[in-house]
Image: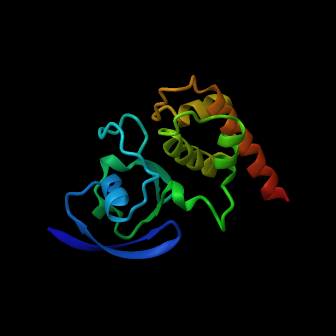
Amino acid sequence: MKRIIKFKLNGEDVEVLAQDNITMVDFLRKELQLTGTKRGCEEGECGACTILLDGAAVDSCMMLAVEADGHEVVTIEGLQKDGVLHPLQREFIDKWALQCGFCTPGMIMSAVSLLSENPHPTEKEIRDAIAGNLCRCTGYTKIVEAIDAAAKVMAKEVHA
């Protein structure tokens, strides 16, 4: 069965028809063509599908699209503003915190959630925040460095 759902997606109000049993990751990728959110383990273990739901990092493979009704959803595509990358996106590039790139969107979305709640995290807090995101290419050092650098950039932007 399908139903109409209304929610805010990347800052825009949307009203769409969704199958009752489609996961949010599949809905984003197949129905809305937002392919930045990756489909990984499908069990909520790898973090590749992480999105923000009302500001909190969630595994979109573990929620149904209809559960977004009435909420705010942000995907990796929603971080860029007017063609300008989010500081986390810039720092992931500048610090070489990505290799194959498969885990990158989920890592960044988890980091966005962290920095919105804790703008000055310690290394341990950063590592804890991304603990649910698996990367098979790196040892996480560059990822942690990128998140830390982005936190500092974002703090300067707030005070500028």
Q: Position of residue 30 (x, y in %)?
A: 32, 59
**Left or right of 46 in this view: 97:** right
**Left or right of 146 in this view: 136:** left
For the C terminus, the image quarter is bottom right
For the N terminus, the image quarter is bottom left
For the residue pair 53 and 143, the one nearer the viewer reads as 143
Residue located farthest toward the right when viewing the structure as drawn: 160
**Vertical placement of residue 66 versus 121, above or below:** below
Residue located farthest toward the top when viewing the structure as drawn: 139
Q: Position of residue 19 (x, y in %)?
A: 21, 65
Q: Position of residue 116 (x, y in %)?
A: 62, 52
For the residue pair 71 and 78, the one nearer the viewer reads as 78
Look at 45% across and 76% down and name the residue there: 13
**Vertical placement of residue 1 versus 127, above or below:** below
**Left or right of 32 in this view: 110:** right
Look at 30% across and 38% down and name the residue there: 43
Please identify the quarter of the rendering in which residue 158 is found: bottom right
For the residue pair 116 and 76, the one nearer the viewer reads as 76
**Left or right of 150 in this view: 11:** left
Look at 35% across and 52% down and name the residue there: 25
Q: How is the protein colored in the picture?
A: rainbow
Q: Position of residue 24 (x, y in %)?
A: 33, 56
Q: How many marks?
A: 0
Residue located farthest toward the left when viewing the structure as drawn: 1
